[in-house]
Amino acid sequence: MIEVSGLRKAYPGVVALDGVSLQIRPGEVVGLAGENGAGKSTLLKALVGLVRPDEGTISVRGRQVRLRGVAEAAAHGIGMVFQEQSLVPNLTAAENILLGCEGSGVRLGVYRWRRLRELAQAQLDKIGSRVDPMARTETLSFAERQMVEIAKVLAIEERTKEPPVVLLDEPTSVLETEEIETLFAQIERLRKHASVVFVSHRLDEVLQVCDRVYVLRGGQVAGEIDPATADAADLHRMMIGTEATGSHYHDDLHTPPERESVRLSVRGLCGDGFSDVSFDLARGEVVAVAGVHGSGREELCRALFGGRAITAGQVELDGETVRLSSPRDAVRAGLGYVPSERKVEGIVAAMSVAENMALPHTGALAREAQAVEEWIERLRIKTPDRHTAIGTLSGGNQQKVVLARWLLTGSLRVLLLDHPTRGLDVGAKSEVYRLIRDLSASGVSVLMLADSLEECIAMSDRVLVMKEGRVTMTLHTPPGAKPDPVELVKEMV
Amino acid sequence: MAERIQTYGPAAALLALVAVFAVLSPQFRTLGNLQNLLDAGAVLAVVTIGATYVLILGCIDLSAAGVMGACALAVSLLVANSRTALDLGPLGVLLVVALGAAFGCLSGVLSVGLKVPSFMTTLGVSAIGLGVATVLFAGVQPTVSDPWLLQWASGRWLGFTRLTYLALATVALAWLVQRYTRLGRYALAIGGGEDILRLSGIRVGRYKVAAFTLAGACYGLAAVMITAQLGSGIVQAGAGLSFAAITAAVVGGTQLAGGRGGVAHSMVGVLILTVLANGLVLIGVSPYAQRAVQGVIVVFAVGATLWPLRHRLEVVK
Amino acid sequence: MAVAAHLPDRRLLVVTAMPVAAFLVLLAALAAASPGLLEAGSLLTLADSAAPLTVLAAGATIVVLCGGIDLSVAALASLASVLLASWAPGLHGWAVPAVVTLCALAGAVQGLVHVAFRIPSFVVTLGGMTLWSALALLASGAATVPMPDSTPTDWAFTRLGGLVPSAVLVALGTMAALAALLRVTPLGRWVRAVGHAEPAARLAGLPIARIKVIAFALSGGTAGLAGVLLVARTFSGAPTLADSLLLPAVAAIVVGGTAITGGHGALWRTLVGAGIVTLLRVGLSYAGVDAAYESILYGVLVVGAVALTIDRSKVSIVK
């Protein structure tokens, strides 16, 4: 059906796809597994024309194609069910299913609602869905909307007259257990009409549903796994590989936390996405929070920085209760935050390095300039000077500036790191790790959401595992006694 | 619950207003006042239809005042009048509606083509319209002498003027377009999720321009109606109507963010504003105070529709 | 990142060179058409006529730098003129600070409504525009309010040393004071950060709500001051006195090169912009073009300048 060969896509500083080749055969369910940043989503986006590869080819039914958008991909019979759902909320399910290709449902620009309904119903019937095609999409549940999306992708068949390829990007991440069972039943039905590419963080699911699994690592196909003979541990081992060593994480700079002096104490914290979360953070301790998408760890991290509402529970900092109703409160209390979306939430691209570093600063400008120079030097930030627009620096240097923002005043007590190494190359990652080690040694406590399990275990003194909004396990990970990532995975899913 | 309030709230508010004024003013309860009320609301209704088509997209149209000024002058010069020798009659009216549509099209093309926010382009187009009106005005007010056009506002049939029937017909047509045509449904969809339509390969720009054009045509028609009422073409024909129309649409439940509401909702808003204006005059409130009320109402109405969304982290500029 | 990397250069070139060049070309063209123009006297008269517009646009520029817009400034200036003319007999010299403070408060209220209810600024200020002009009509009875004793505003319409119009100094002083405020305090950096990337500014712990309210208050305050300048030269207040200045004011801001998407821009640009707008207006009348075309000119100017200066990397969907 689809043959991908030598696909390559590079972004400044990162190679997302590095010569990926794979095949998808008719009526087959193919799994894609890999850690964050392994290239899964870039590959999917390339297959639906949202990303244009730098090199390599995509062939559909033996013909080489160049895809320049979702609509063109659909014309070739490839459709994607997006993680963040791509339905127009205020239209009916039927309109969404047939959006842009209403066929005989619209004549001369005039809607024939009855015909439209029949056409949509035919698609829903393929997966045996009982969703009312005339229901407004926003009134449906998430699982129902997912069925509508699948029906929408299946409607491609009406145009190409060939079985389509359906790409499912993390379809189970926000579904309840029963809904997941239903979805898997649908995927079985789908085989009759289409080929399926299934992407999920949950390795057991991948193994359960797929005929074959491709494992991606660092933008390359690390190997192919036959679910009949392999288990989650095999899969995970292949996902991680043996890339990094202790020196990458600067293990030698590790300092043990001062266990007896509690810096941050969180008790019974509740909010949207997490509930009843309690933990302590000692002086100089690095705690990583592990969890799959939807575990609530991102939400927790945001809430601790005042970026999301806290509905119950309390937070104490060095023994004093603090109110965190806005990021401003958090900054004043001595918290710092490095967001995962660096370009949107971390930096102000058009402003200078100095201005970005001193953004929350209110003191005298002369002293500020001096402090900025000092931190540029101490963190070895590569920039022509402090007046250079930060948008022109590399990702790693931008990240250092964001970190320096919290060090400038010297009042930092707790640093919250949300995927601090996302999108950075190996060298830059290592420098960020070193910085984290230095901060921890100076007594700053760090709460970190790691980009990969390996990073999570390597950098932390302790790991909190979160599942469905709650902390389900605490794992001590001191140097020399690091657990196997596979154990952690079992706890996470 | 919140959705219920947004759907039925405006209608309930309308009924409450009618009840209050009916108690406060005996004059409000008369049949004659009902005729006045509908006649007074006719022009606003047509302008609001136009504004609604643009609001549904998630855009905004501030050009009604300027476009109507230009169209009012144009129609008074094209039909039998005191200044030119032209006497085009119905053809003149059609030409003016087309002129309005052309202004709307210009707003749409500028917004879509230059990627400039619509409040800015339509503010500019409004200024252009006012300029054109002033140029056409040339210091001498044209008086309409075409009996056919003047009949629109003066002649009555079953107690109502032709303007009222014309407005009702426009409302019905606009409702049908919104419910049964691709333009109407896609306009709604653009307001709901423009990026999704783009992903589906739909040429969003065309439908946007079409919606703006339709809005312009409505303003053209409204300008003809107002000229029929006044008997002469004036530059200020549409003064204040841009804002009144947006207020009416938003008060009726057509959301500024796009994708919600529609012609039916907006018409409830038109009735609310018209009843309010009529009632306040009858109980002796200054018309300037009414404008002040309008300014507060629109902010309040927008605030009310956005209130459920206030916790989202999206940036509001 | 790649976009951000080469964006500033091109932008800076277009956005900095063009307004200044346009201003100089216009000045040269006008001077060629009427040689007397370059004499100090006529230049100062020209500057004097640009003063109210400049003051009106000054505060509004800060709102635009935040990424918002204030459409209420002209209506607020009209209201200020009515209030000043009505209060001057009673309050004498205190009428001016009272009116300016009140307008700043009115601006702050609009800012508060904008941030507290999360309503887009153009809607709040459109509502404000209607409200202020209605209040002006109510307060004045829809008529011009004469000011029999002009002493409280004489300072704003006189010529220092018989030559330099005081209004020009007021305008330049206002600009300088605001520019200094943005320079010396972190406000300037904060305003630009909010305009460029509000999410990042928020997560850096900036007091976003306070920054925006201050911007709107400054905009209201300068609108009030513009109203004072207008009263000084007409010896009366009127409910629609400044209304026709809204579009020229917006034009002055954007023609100077400040992007309505926020962040990019500066106060001095508005000064240049006001110069361009004024020269164009004068130029049109020199060229014998009917004043009726002025409005068309402003419309084209605003749309054109916005289209040239807007930061398209920031707007994925244009509403």
Image: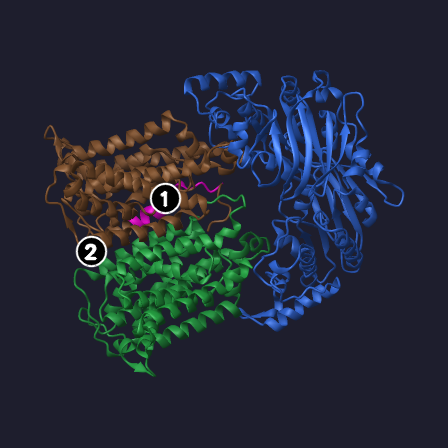
Chain colours: A blue, B green, C brown
Does residue A414 sit above or below B232 in this rendering?
above
* The stretch drawn in magenta includes residue A458: no
Which image quarter: residue C160?
top left
Could you tell me if residue B282 is visible in this image? Answer: yes
**Looking at this rendering, what residue extends furthest in the bottom direction?**
B158
Q: Main secondary structure of the magenta part?
A: helix
Q: Chain of mark 2?
A: C
> Residue A197 in the image: x percent, y percent?
75, 49
Question: Which numbered tag is attached to residue C109?
Answer: 1
- Residue at image x 36%, y 52%? C127
Q: Which residues are magenta?
A: C298-313
Q: Which residue is label 2 attached to?
A: C141
**Is residue A246 found left or right of C152 in the rendered image?**
right
Q: Amino acid at mark 2?
A: Gly
* Residue A27 quadrant: bottom right
Across and down, in percent, residue A73 comes to: 65, 53
Q: Which subunit holds the residue at mark 1?
A: C
